[in-house]
Image (cartoon, rainbow, N blue to C red):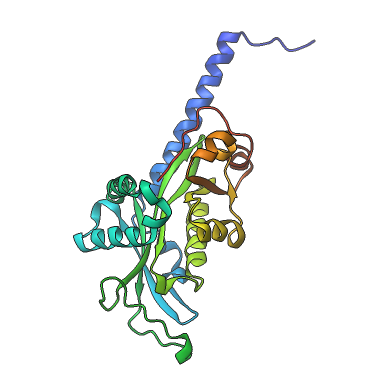
Amino acid sequence: MDAKRLPSGKEKKLKRKEVLEKKKTIDEIIKKASSVKDHLVSFPPFRHYERNGLSVYLESGLGDQLTSPIKKYIQNLLKINMEAPYGSEWPAEEKVKRREMVSPDAHYIFVRKSTNQTPVSESEETNCAGLTGDQNALVGFVHYRFIVEEDVPVVYVYELQLEACAQRKGLGKFLMQLIELIAHKNRMGAVMLTVQKANILAMSFYTSKLSYTISAISPSQIDPLIGSEKSYEIFCKTFNSEAKEKMEGKPQHGGHLLTS
């Protein structure tokens, strides 16, 4: 005999309970990941980077604990690196980024020049005094957050900014590998980020060097006409089947777009 079908009212109740339980689980995952003050503790080998004539060390930070000099540094480096890609949108975007910068949800990895830098050869020596000109100067940073996209917990990289002296030395790839490890350890389904289309080098870096794909929630994938009017793409790298389906498959209605 066929099993009796549950009444629709009961089915809806069970479905609602399932959805609420899943949301609670995801919220707990995000809360736990966000409560960690220093994610570098779990990855000692990533504390230092010494390759291609560049010697730096990493340290963690939080948005609501930034000192005034570090805030100023972040603002300056963002302007240097991003004013051109954003073009006429930059003045408005700069204000948004200043608010995002100090959010309690903002996690940072700061890159500082090591004072004991010993170049392999004179030709590889890197003049990397940083914008501050100080010893142990900052030469870059990553700003990332733990958020929910399409019911999937993800690490969203708001910024990956390096000074010219620290670029093209493998450091960007190293930092993104670290972000991916942090995502895995904290049970995130994906790493996501937004890239300005005008930033050709960054577009190529994420697709060619790191194998990121344009997400299904990127404007160009939701609607080519809308996408052609937008100045950015949303990239992702997924770590499980659910995230892959939602982030790389057909876009789902109701998703929101981050433009930071």
Residue 47 rendering spot, x and y as whole percentages: 41, 70
Query: Which residue reaches farthest left?
Result: 68
Asked if residue 15 is positioned above or below residue 258 in the image, the reply reads: above
In the image, residue 204 above or below residue 255: below
Reply above or below: 192 against 134. above
Q: Is residue 238 visible?
A: no
Answer left or right for 102 relative to 54: left
Residue sitting at the far front: 88
Instruction: Give whichever of 168, 172 is nearer the camera.
Output: 168
**Quadrant into which the N terminus falls:** top right
Point out residue 137 in the picture as x, y percentages from the top left corner.
Answer: 29, 73
Q: Residue at x 30, y 55 (%)?
A: 62
Q: Residue shown at 41%/79% (left/top)?
A: 55
Quadrant of residue 127 in the image? bottom left
Q: Residue at x 55, y 48 (%)?
A: 236
**Residue 219 position within the rendered picture, expressed as x and y whole percent measured from the top left:** 53, 38
In front here: 110 or 94? Answer: 94
Image coords of residue 227 (percent x, y): 54, 38
Give the residue displayed 42% in from the left and 72% down from the top. Answer: 166
Of all residues, the one furthest to the bottom in this rendering is 122
Q: How many marks?
A: 0
Is 60 situated left or right of 235 in this image?
left
Q: Nearer the viewer, residue 190 or 159?
A: 159
- Look at the picture and state if 192 lies above or below 9: below
**Position of residue 56 in the picture relative to residue 178 (left or right):** left
Q: Is residue 229 visible?
A: yes
